[in-house]
Image: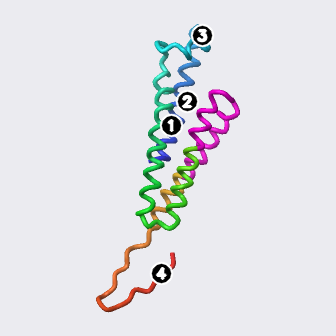
Amino acid sequence: MIALEVVVQAATMAFGVAALVLWVDEGNSFDKALLENEDAEFDGLAGLIMHGINGMMVIPLLALLLLIVSFFAKVPKGILWAGLVLLFTVVQVVLGLLGHSYAIAGGIHGANALLLFGLAVMAFMRSKTVPPPTTTAPGQTQQPTRV
């Protein structure tokens, strides 16, 4: 889900910026007054709003839920992978907020999104390697297996 949400983030941002550029091409002005105007409207505004909500609330919640589930999932190194996903999500949120003040943070935000996507995919792939449950007959002892 997190990898899919990163794709949604890229799509909503691309839509919002492309629509904003078209809006400016039609003779409108993009300036600080527009950013501060609560009644401002252009076609891509919904994409930018969705990007903000998704990035500030939905993805962090999913990353936190992944970490919680990882404690019970018995995936080899699952807690590590879920922890990395949560860490990169927190970094992503911080970079997104800093991007409003520092352009370089916006660039790093984009690069970190790709890393987060990769980590989320890797965590998913690791979940496919859960060893099958072993059963023993009554009176037999189970030998530990290495994974």
- The magenta span reads 91-119
Residue kind at label 3, given as amino acid type: Ser
Q: Nearer the viewer, mark 4 or mark 2?
A: 4
Residue 102's quadrant in the figure?
A: top right
Residue 93 coordinates in the image, percent (x, y): 56, 39
Q: CA distance from mark 4 to mark 1?
A: 40 Å
- In the picture as drawn, the residue positioned furthest to the right comes out as 104
Q: Position of residue 65 (x, y in %)?
A: 43, 51
| Residue neighbourhood size for the residue with mark 1, other residues' Cα within 10 Å, grouped as few (<14), some (14–19), many (≥20) | many
The Cα–Cα distance between marks 4 and 3, rounded to whole angstroms, is 66 Å
For marks 2 and 3, the one nearer the N-term is: 2
Callout 1 amino acid: Gly
Q: Is 95 displayed left or right of 104 in the figure?
A: left
Among all residues in the image, which is located at the extreme top? 27
Q: Say which residue label 2 marks.
A: 14
The residue indicated by pointer 1 is 55
Residue at 43 percent of width and 72 percent of height? 131
Position in image of residue 25 (x %, y %): 59, 12
**Which residue does the image show at 52% across and 52% down from the upper left?**
120
Mark 2, Cα crowd under 10 Å, few <14 / some 14-19 / many 20+, is some
146 versus 78 height, above or below: below
- Sequence-wise, which precedes: disc 4 or disc 1? 1
The stretch drawn in magenta includes residue 111: yes
| Badge 4: residue crowd in 10 Å (few <14, some 14–19, many ≥20) | few
- Picture disc at residue 29: 3
Q: Which residue is mark 4?
A: 145
- Residue at image point 70% right, 33% down: 104
Residue type, numbered disc 4? Thr
Q: Locate residue 10: give its quadrant.
A: top right
The answer for how far apart the CA atoms under marks 1 and 3 are is 27 Å
**Helix, strand or loop: magenta stretch:** helix
The kind of residue on which mark 2 rests is Ala
